[in-house]
Image: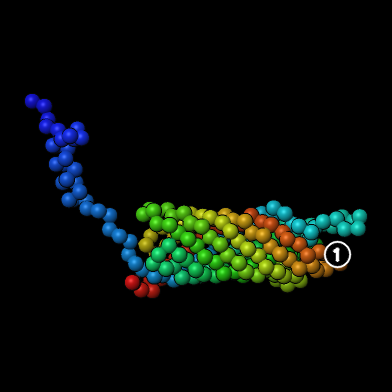
Amino acid sequence: MGQETDGAGTSASDATVAGRFEETVGPRPPPLNVEYAQYGVALTAAINLSEGAACQEQQGAFLPCILGSGGGLLIRGGYRSPGPWYFGGSYEFTKMDSSNLYRLGIFQQLRVEMRYLPDFGTRAAPYFTAGVGGVAYGNEWGAETGGAHLSLGAGVELEISRLTVLGISGGWRPVLLAGWTDTAGYRRRTAIAQFLGLELMIEVRTELGRR
């Protein structure tokens, strides 16, 4: 004897098994509406895409580039809403390649930032990020020049526990630097430099409350 089927070609036994499975498993529960303080650290890299006028030839003389690529550390803290938004701030310092014009060329960034994390119901959550802030650059933590910068990027956040996340991100960072005279006596023009910023981060969360 053949199995009875409905109009869509589904057997009665298949429908019974599917119904029992749905009763056992049930629908996926909605995410908890929890607010968090989220903070952590990141290893960073700044890859020079364009140094702008700061390293261009001037009056027939070649100037060693004082603003190359580098790596450093970032400290971050902020507020993670029950929805898809994160708002916070970060401080980043990077040891830059300064063609030996600085003993220790430190590029410092302080910015406010946000993330948008759409909910796909998985532990790995892609996100978009943007930020704006100020910069300072000089020898051995000095501030011989300064300016402003913008950050636009994307990344992936992996939840390894309910209160701990790992992440990796990358983004475009244009930087406006005021003109200055460096310690070697070279006059540097006002410049718009561009960097590719990379981060490898670990962050933890502290529960603030539920809505």
| Quarter of the image with the C terminus in it | bottom left
The answer to which image quadrant residue 98 occupies is bottom right
Within 10 Å of disc 1 (Cα), the crowding (few <14, some 14-19, many 20+) is some
Q: Residue at x 79, y 59 (%)?
A: 53
Secondary structure, mark 1, is loop
The answer to which image quadrant residue 110 occupies is bottom right
Q: Residue at x 64, y 59 (%)?
A: 173
Location of mark 1 (residue): 186
The answer to which image quadrant residue 65 occupies is bottom right
8 displayed left or right of 106 = left
| Quarter of the image with the N terminus in it | top left
* Residue 22: image location, x then y, percent: 20, 48
The image shows residue 69, relative to residue 109, as above or below, that is above
**Of residues 148 and 144, the one drawn nearer to the viewer in this rendering:** 148
**Colouring used for the render:** rainbow
Residue 184 in view, yes or no: no
* Residue 8: image location, x then y, percent: 20, 35
107 displayed left or right of 91 = right
* Residue 209: image location, x then y, percent: 35, 73
Residue 9 in view, yes or no: yes
- Most extreme residue toward the front is 7
175 displayed left or right of 10 = right
- Most extreme residue toward the right is 60
Q: Residue at x 60, y 61 (%)?
A: 151
**Of residues 7 and 148, the one drawn nearer to the viewer in this rendering:** 7
* Residue 86: image location, x then y, percent: 47, 66
Q: Amino acid at mark 1?
A: Tyr
- Most extreme residue toward the bottom is 208
The image shows residue 183, relative to residue 50, as above or below, that is below
- Most extreme residue toward the left is 1
Q: Residue at x 76, y 57 (%)?
A: 52
